[in-house]
């Protein structure tokens, strides 16, 4: 049964359409040199990202699993051409995530200090926003797409700074995936974006990995009903 996958696809489609409209507003501002449109688009993009971060303490990386347009793009478009090789373990380490987040933070700080080499605008919001749009496009083209073809489609999501921030915020989340009476048939293993559920099958356990998207793809993949979402107020850490 693809109960969750069918609902998730609809939610992802709505999110992609909404974010495409928002991006179009921002790009219209860039093309017409109208900083008013550009700023509205950027504020809406910022509001979407902030919404994702606000969800994290309750729902974990639900934003990544159900709503992020970049994650959706990687999942479905790269899903058609990806080799689907295992993601190197190094890319899932805290050190690697911190390295990528630090590089982004330094670049972002430079822009905040007025050292944006890309967009010479007096308007701080336009300058910062232009940089964020540029960063999204460049990291997608140069990192997310090549890695998604070589390894799993959403390899980028294993160290993306926005995803990592959600993982850090989700220590006391209430939405979990639980595995009980698992026969270890391994049918769910190939469904996971980040190779997470294979570490939990064969035993009765809540999936504790903070990087879990709560996408429920492994739930749908389990035909024995051993894998299901649970709401628990009890912290798993
Ligand atoms: S990890 Fe980053 S790119 Fe991937 S879905 Fe989450 S926010 Fe989007
Ligand atoms: S463990 Fe299951 S719910 Fe979590 S990311 Fe993997 S497939 Fe999705
Ligand atoms: S959770 Fe379900 S699909 Fe996954 S190994 Fe266990 S029984 Fe098999």
Image (cartoon, helix red, strand yellow):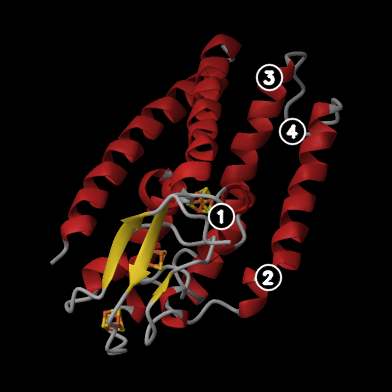
Q: Which mark is residue 118?
A: 4
Asked whether residue 77 is in view, the answer is no
- Residue occupying image coordinates x 25% and y 75%: 226
Local secondary structure at mark 4: loop
Displayed quadrant of residue 123 = top right
Task: State how far apart marks 2 and 4 are (Cα).
Answer: 32 Å
Mark nearer the viewer, 2 or 4 = 2
The N terminus, quarter of image = bottom left
Task: State how far apart marks 1 and 3 are (Cα).
Answer: 24 Å
Mark nearer the viewer, 2 or 1 = 2
Q: Residues within 10 Å of mark 4 (few under 14, many from 20)?
A: few
Identify residue for label 1.
Answer: 141
Residue nearer the viewer, 232 or 49: 232
Identify residue for label 3.
Answer: 125
Identify residue for label 2.
Answer: 93
Q: Point out the quarter of the image occupied by ligand 2.
A: bottom left
Asked whether residue 61 is in view, the answer is yes
């Amino acid at each position: 049964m693809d109960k969750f996958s069918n609902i998730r696809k609809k939610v992802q489609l709505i999110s992609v359409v909404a974010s495409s409209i928002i991006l179009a507003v921002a790009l219209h501002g860039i093309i017409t040199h109208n900083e008013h449109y550009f700023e509205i688009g950027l504020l809406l993009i910022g509001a979407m990202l902030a919404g994702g971060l606000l969800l994290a303490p309750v729902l974990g990386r639900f934003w990544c699993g159900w709503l992020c347009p970049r994650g959706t793009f990687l999942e479905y478009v790269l899903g058609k051409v990806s080799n689907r090789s295992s993601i190197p373990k190094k890319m899932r380490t805290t050190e690697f995530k911190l390295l990528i987040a630090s590089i982004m933070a330094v670049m972002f700080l430079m822009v905040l200090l007025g050292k944006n080499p890309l967009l010479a605008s007096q308007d701080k919001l336009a300058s910062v926003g232009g940089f964020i749009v540029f960063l999204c496009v460049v990291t997608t083209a140069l990192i997310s797409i090549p890695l998604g073809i070589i390894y799993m489609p959403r390899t980028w999501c294993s160290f993306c700074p926005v995803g990592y921030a959600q993982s850090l915020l989700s220590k006391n989340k209430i939405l979990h995936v639980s595995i009980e009476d698992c026969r270890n048939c391994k049918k769910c293993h190939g469904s996971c974006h980040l190779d997470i559920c294979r570490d939990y099958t064969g035993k009765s356990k809540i999936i504790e990995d903070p990087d879990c998207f709560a996408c429920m793809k492994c739930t749908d993949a389990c035909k024995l009903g051993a894998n299901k979402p649970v709401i628990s107020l009890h912290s798993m850490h």
